[in-house]
Amino acid sequence: MNSTDHMDKPIQYTLCLVFFCLVSILPAQIRTHDNGEVTFSVIRDSKTGMLRGLSGWNGRSLSDNFRYPVDGQRQYLGMYSDIWIGTAKDLVAGGWNLDGKSNWVAEKEISQTDIPNGTRSTSVEYEAVDIDLNLLVTQRVISWGRSTHPDADDFVVIQLTITNGDVIDLTDVYVAICADWNMDQVGADKADFSKDWFDYNKELSMLYAYDGDDSDGLDPVHAGLILLDGKLATHQIFPIKNQENGQLNTAVFAPAYRSPLISDPNRFYRSKISARNKADLDELEWTAWDYVAILSAGRYDIRAKQSIQITFGLVAGKSKSDLLDNAQMAKWITYSPQNITLERSQGLVKLQWEPAINYVDGYQVRRLTIGENNLDQLGPRILNSLRYDDATVERGIRYRYTILPVVGNALEELASKPIDTALASTPENVILTDQDKAVLVTWNKPLYVPAGYYVFRRAEGESDFRQITPDIVKDLTFADVEVETGVEYVYRVRPLDTKQQPLAFDSNEVRILPVFPPSRLYTERGTKPDSITVHWPLVSERIAGYNVYRSYNGIEPWTRIASISKSEIQNLSEKPDGSARLTDQFSVLDQIDLHFVDPNVYSGSTYYYMVTALNQEGRESQASTPTERLLISDQNELSTQVNLLKIFTYPSPWQLLKYDRLTFANLMGQVVITIFTPNGDLVHRIDHINGKDKTTWDGRNKDGRLISPGVYIYHVETLNPQIVGKISFSGQITVFR
């Protein structure tokens, strides 16, 4: 290869000296892209406004650019990498020239913007000087953040908008990037040179480089220069250093050589001065060496005061396959509409999106009807807008939308990511609550209210869901009473159409491991002086433990005074006589009842107790119904017979449309019963004065209207304290239709 013979050696040395002086004293304004896996800098001389192509910055002077990965030690793009714009008539502007000057001068500073979606954009405007080309260039560099776009963080995109500032048309224009990839020689002795292989991928219009010197181990990193938007003119692999003496090939700095390099794909190949791909390098018997990749778009005719737009990409990958994937992603993200938003309203789906980075003729909207596989094109073949309103949707049908860029034809492979929606009756925000021996299933009203719902459940050990609602549920709640504590259940809610047929819009599946408090909790005076015993049944082996709470007034505050785990209960149960005790507080009687002794009570004080259970996940149940008031008195003025009575309600939970009355049982003679909402609002009052142990309620409030489904609190208080003492009791009622 004797391409350097076209330049005199004194000119080469002078040029190198000028370059060295310029890059050593440059006061720079720097804007850096490091939000992705690539670090790439845009440099402007803050005094002269001069730009030096695609050079980087080492903290003191111009240097190599394009660090990969972002925290790595290697920069793979040589400092002489450049942007060339010119004609086929030896008139090419660039950032590195034989006179040591740059044709690119920016009067304004570089601007940089970080968009909330993780995209970073750097923009600078510069014009061509000291050359007979009236060009104004707007250079925009774009990168994507690794946290927001993990599939698009291995490249930067360089978009060039070239404006003809002249009053006459400019013809035969070419736009090129010269990428001095150095994959091998990075940080090595300057006497050594990068020994790389280059190749061309036709499908992607990409020249790429990789380490070709296996004496020091192969660097797995591949890097490529890709034409993302524009008419391909040439692609050249050109030696930047002479293989015989290692001197810089200054041909790349001379317009006379740049013109054919960017306009004629075969001129230098015919002269065996350049190659087009790896096969050419092998045919010429060239070795791995320090080459540059030259990729050119053209030819263009730019009318006076008009513009053209070209987009390139600098791409990296940890292997060849990774590089190809990343290059394809760079092509997709620059053509595909991004940040699609969707708004649903009555009978309408509104779509909006951001424009493609590259030039497109317009867009095409397509809609897939899920379940029917009907793919429809909506609106015109080419939509010259960034929004579309779909008024042909139907309630209860799910749709999938994609937006395609159109350049001549719709680019199928560059379609946007699909976005699904429905004017549907899908129940949303399904919530499960375990209370009163039932799992209460509630959900939010969907956008379009269906005719009703079915609730489906799958229990632990079951493979299929089964419908557990015998009838259509009209409300937004259902109480499942056929459940056991400690058994995992999974629920979903299915909407129905007006013909009471299921719609294909089941809610999300929601799980619960229910845990219920013990029932039949009661207290009595302990066998020891100044003690109280609390009793409750052991209803399930799946209970992981219990907590015992105490109060002085039957309301807040409740204080936890004891706990016992499943293993401790099992240890107690192993002693048939109940002799095994835990700190003299817990014991098991007849393998079915757990007894707790509270020794910390005092004469003249009253006490209330409630108990919670724990499931295998450690979640605590609701509290049991509090026990009756128990007064510690030396006179034994209270009837223990009365205190042992347990007030309860049935049915529990109460299904209004199935049972027209709720029964209060085990009442203590004459009592007043008050029913409240959880917020403390009075619902109803019952004065029970006949002295019987039962009374009923028809579910109507104080205004005579039937109550709504939900949870209510009842309070019972004796009216004959001279006989049984002033005793009160509180509990909960769960109501559903």
Image (spheres, helix red, strand yellow):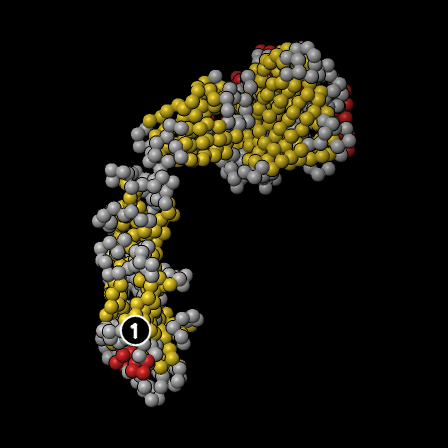
* Looking at the image, residue 555 lies above or below residue 182: below
Residue 528, position in %: x, y? 33, 86
* Front position in the image: 719 or 119: 719
In the rendered image, the residue lying farthest to the bottom is 635
Of residues 479 and 291, the one nearer the viewer is 479
Q: Quadrant of residue 238?
A: top right
Image position of 737 (left or right of 239): left
The local secondary structure at tag 1 comes to: strand
Number of marks present in the image shown: 1
In this view, 623 is above or below 360:
below
| 49 or 98, nearer to the observer | 49
Give percent across and percent down for residue 284.
Answer: 55, 17
Q: Which residue occupies the extreme front position in the image?
A: 703
Q: Residue at x 70, y 24 (%)?
A: 126
- The image quarter containing residue 368 is top left
> Where's the N terminus, which quadrant?
top right
Across and down, in percent, residue 268 comes to: 60, 13
Query: Hey, what amino acid is under mark 1?
Result: Val
Residue at position x 46%, y 27% in the image: 388
Residue at the image position 36 percent from the left and 52 percent from the top:
431
Q: Position of residue 707 (x, y in %)?
A: 32, 56
Residue 141 visible from this viewpoint: yes
Q: Residues within 10 Å of mark 1 (few under 14, many from 20)?
A: many
Left or right: residue 13 compared with residue 291: right
275 above or below 552? above
What residue would you read off at disc 1? Answer: 671
Q: Residue at x 34, y 79 (%)?
A: 726
Choose top left, top right, bottom left or bottom right for residue 568.
bottom left
Residue 207 appears in the rendering? no
Figure check: 667 above or below 435: below
